[in-house]
Image (cartoon, grey):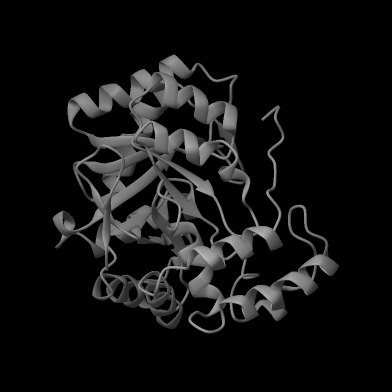
Amino acid sequence: MKKTQLGSSELYVSQLGLGCMSLGTDERTAFPILEAAMEQGVNYFDTADLYDMGQNEKLLGTFFKQNREDIIIASKVGNKWNDKKDGWTWDASKSYIKEAVKQSLKRLNTDYIDLYQLHGGTLEDNIKETIEAFEDLKEEGIIRYYGISSIRPNVIREYVKYSSIVSVMMQYSMLDRRPEEEALPLLAENGISAVTRGPVAKGLLSENYQKKLVKGYLDYSLEELQTILPKLKEIVADKHTLTEAALQYNLANSAVASVIAGASSIEQLVENAKAVNSEPLSSGEMETIKKMTKANLYDQHR
C-alpha cells in the first residue's frame, strides 16, 4: 500500500488508516482485524483516550508491544471523563494534556506517541497554552509530532497560524464537501496534511447504501439521497464500486495524506484496503461527482 508523508514530518503513513474506535474491547475479534490491517500494508492506527474509556488504547498497547517500531500510533486528548464515568467535559489546558499523555503512554505500553492530536478545540480555549503543552511534549520526546482533530474552520486557522501541527483530522466525503471551501486549500498551502474520516458517510457511500437510507444527511433530504446515490454508483460503475470511489475521492485531493476508516470485520478491512489500492478517479468522474453533489458550507460562526 502506498505511503504518504504526513505534512513536514518524518512520518510516512499508509493511505488507509485504521480507525480503531470500532474494534470493541474483545481481543478475540479485535486482534484478527489488526493483524489483517498489517497484512494489507496499513501502518497508521488511530485511537483516542476517550474510546471505551481508554480500553481502546490498551488494546493497541497489548497487540503492538512486539512490533511497535513498525507502526504509527495516533491518539487524541482533550475530553476528560467525569468521576462517574457517564460523561465527559472539555479540557485543553496544559496541565490536563501533560497528565493525560502519561496515562495514554501507560495504556499504549509505549514511551512515545507518533502523532498526538487535540480531540476538538474551540476559540474559547487558551490556544497559546495548548500549543505550549504539545511543544513541550515534543521537546521532551514523549510525542514525535502533533496535530488537531477538528471540523471548525476558525479553530483550524488559529493552529495553522500559530503552531507546528503536521496534520488536521476532519470529516470529508463526496456528501460532505465542506473542507473543500477553505480548510483543504489552507492546509495544502501551508504544507500540513489532512487526515480524513467518514469517507463513506455512515455507509451511504457503500455498496449497501440502501440499508442506510432511513433519513437525510447534512444538507441532503432523504428524497435527494434516493436520487443521487444510485446515480453516483452508476457514474463510477465501469471501474469502481461505490466504496472505492468514495475513498478515491478523498485521496484525489493533494492535501489528503490518509483516509481513516473503521472496520468491524476482516472482510470490511480488506474491502477498504482494496478501495485505497484501486485506480484513481478520472478528472471527468471527479467533475461529474462535484456537479451532482453539494458544495456544503460550514457555519461561519464555528
User: Is residue 284 left or right of 134 when viewed as pictured?
Assistant: right
Please, is residue 237 above or below residue 46 in the view? below
- Quarter of the image where one finds residue 138: top left
Please, is residue 91 above or below residue 72 in the view? above
Residue 90 locus on image (x, y percent): 56, 31
Residue 164 locus on image (x, y percent): 33, 26
The residue located at (55%, 58%) in the rendering is 198
The residue located at (70%, 78%) in the rendering is 230
Residue closest to the eye, 213 or 140: 213
Residue closest to the eye, 56 or 257: 257
Residue 141 seen in render: yes
Residue 24 seen in render: no
The residue located at (54%, 66%) in the rendering is 284
Residue closest to the eye, 220 or 152: 220
Residue 126 locus on image (x, y percent): 50, 16
Quarter holding the C terminus is top right
Please, is residue 235 above or below residue 4 in the view? below
User: Is residue 48 left or right of 290 when viewed as pictured?
Assistant: left
Residue 221 locus on image (x, y percent): 83, 61
The residue located at (37%, 73%) in the rendering is 273
